[in-house]
Amino acid sequence: MSADRPGFEAKLCEPAQLPRRIAALARPLVFTNGVFDILHRGHVTYLAEARALGASLVVAANSDASARRLGKGEDRPINRLEDRAAVLAALQAVDLVSWFDEDTPLALILACRPDVLVKGGDWKPEAIVGAREVIAWGGSVHSIPFQFERSTTATLNRIRGL
């Protein structure tokens, strides 16, 4: 994936390029992460609310291998990283999309030094990876309550039941 592509694909950012690309973004910078396998209303609402907490939003997606290690099922993710990242980049609320192969996005959080760290309502702020570090450099950590109870796993189970 390259920043040389036109349109929304210019929002795709190799992890090694993240510090350079972030330097061009407005602050406060918001950071979040997730698999975002089959994007649904809950994801889109969450990302819009995360973006509202700052001037720019960086989203880090789990690589395919990282997503598989989360134990969501042998066939997950359904969509490959390239596709998940492109769909995220197409969202107006998202300013930059990167990815990570590790089990957590801590290395990217340290590279980005976001002003605001965000996860969904199923995470307590103190349990969010990177929370301690972000708070230590003066940032804030938020757990955004779910407005729409949606789940990719539940959607896939419904589809499989048909």
Image (tube, grey):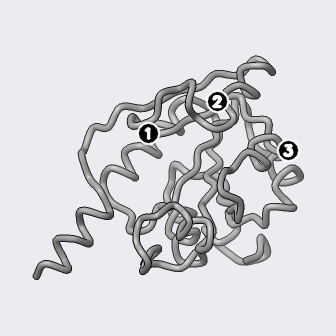
User: Looking at numbered disc 3 in the image, what kind of residue is underneath it?
Assistant: Ala
Q: Residues within 10 Å of mark 1 (few under 14, many from 20)?
A: many
| Element under disc 2 | strand
Q: Amino acid at mark 2?
A: Val
- Count all numbered tags in the image, as a single digit: 3
- How far is mark 1 from mark 2, CA to CA? 13 Å
Q: Which mark is residue 120?
A: 1
| Residue named by callout 3 | 23
Residue 91 is situated, as x and y percent measured from the top left of the image, at 49, 58
Q: Earlier in the sequence, mark 3 or mark 2?
A: 3
Mark 3 lies on a secondary structure that is loop
Which of 156 and 72 lies nearest the eye of the viewer? 72
* Residue 128, x across and y down, in percent: 58, 34
**Mark 1 secondary-structure assignment:** strand
Q: Foreground residue, 132 or 111? A: 132
Q: Residue at x 44, y 39 (%)?
A: 120
